[in-house]
Image: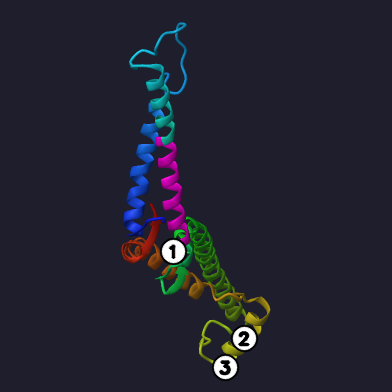
Amino acid sequence: MIKITTITVTDALAELTLLQKRIESARISLEDNTLITYVEMGKVPTGFKSREDYETKAKASLQKVDALITRRRVIKRAIVLSNAQTIVTVASENMTVAEAIEMKNFIMYYESVLNTMHSAYKTTISQYEKAKVKIKDRLDKLALEVLGKNVNSGSDRYQSLADSFLAREGVELLDPTNLAEEVEKRQSFIEEFNSTVDRVLSISNARTMIDIPD
């Protein structure tokens, strides 16, 4: 009967780190004639009591590293399966732990798009405002020529001239995506995600239990 140990994901991750070090140490121990060597006819490898002793320890060394690798695969599989099923809430969005981990790597694409959107908004608004100033200067110059220098900018005559002029020569902002609002919404999500995801995952890992076959 297979014995099952139940541990938290946090403990499983800690064991993975330890196993990685043990696997490397066990791999290194396979070097320097541990698995295969040569000797003079009838002789025993240096440091061993007999050829049987060398054979036993060679097999044991290989079995040790294989057992460590198998243990790591079992634990990693349990974590992967748990991550694919466990739901967490990050930045007001429900997602699996696996999706949250992937989003940590993927968020840079969101940030890149956000930076492009923000830059496009700032550049266009600046150009738009400058264009409006130039058009206002042209309108004032036209009003001076047509209406005279004493005309009141609030008068009906000025307003009629301005409406006609701006309809022909004015500029308007085309903003089909409501860019300022979209930038704010996306920036809010990115900031909240980056500031909370590690804490959310840490809490989830500490609470989520997984079964590890021994």
Residue in front for this viewpoint, 168 or 88:
88
C-alpha gap between disc 3 and disc 1: 65 Å
Q: Nearer the viewer, mark 1 or mark 2?
A: 1
Number of the label disc, if any, that sits on residue 156? 3
Q: Amino acid at mark 3?
A: Asp
- Farthest residue in the right direction? 168
Q: Nearer the viewer, mark 3 or mark 2?
A: 2
Which residue is labeled 2 in the image?
Answer: 163
Q: Nearer the viewer, mark 3 or mark 1?
A: 1
SS at circle 2: helix
Q: Residue at x 42, y 74 (%)?
A: 92
- Farthest residue in the bottom direction? 156
**x, y percentage for residue 195?**
35, 63
Q: Quadrant of residue 161?
A: bottom right
Answer left or right for 207 relative to 70: left
**In the depicted structure, whether residue 150 falls above or below residue 40:** below
Does the magenta segment cover residue 170? no
Q: Amino acid at mark 2?
A: Asp
At label 3, counting other C-alpha atoms closer than 10 Å, the crowd grade (few under 14, some 14-19, many 20 or more) is few
Q: Amino acid at mark 1?
A: Val
**x, y percentage for residue 55?**
43, 23
**x, y percentage for residue 111?**
48, 60
Question: In the picture, which quadrant includes the N terminus?
Answer: bottom left
Number of the label disc, if any, that sits on residue 97? 1
C-alpha gap between disc 3 and disc 2: 10 Å
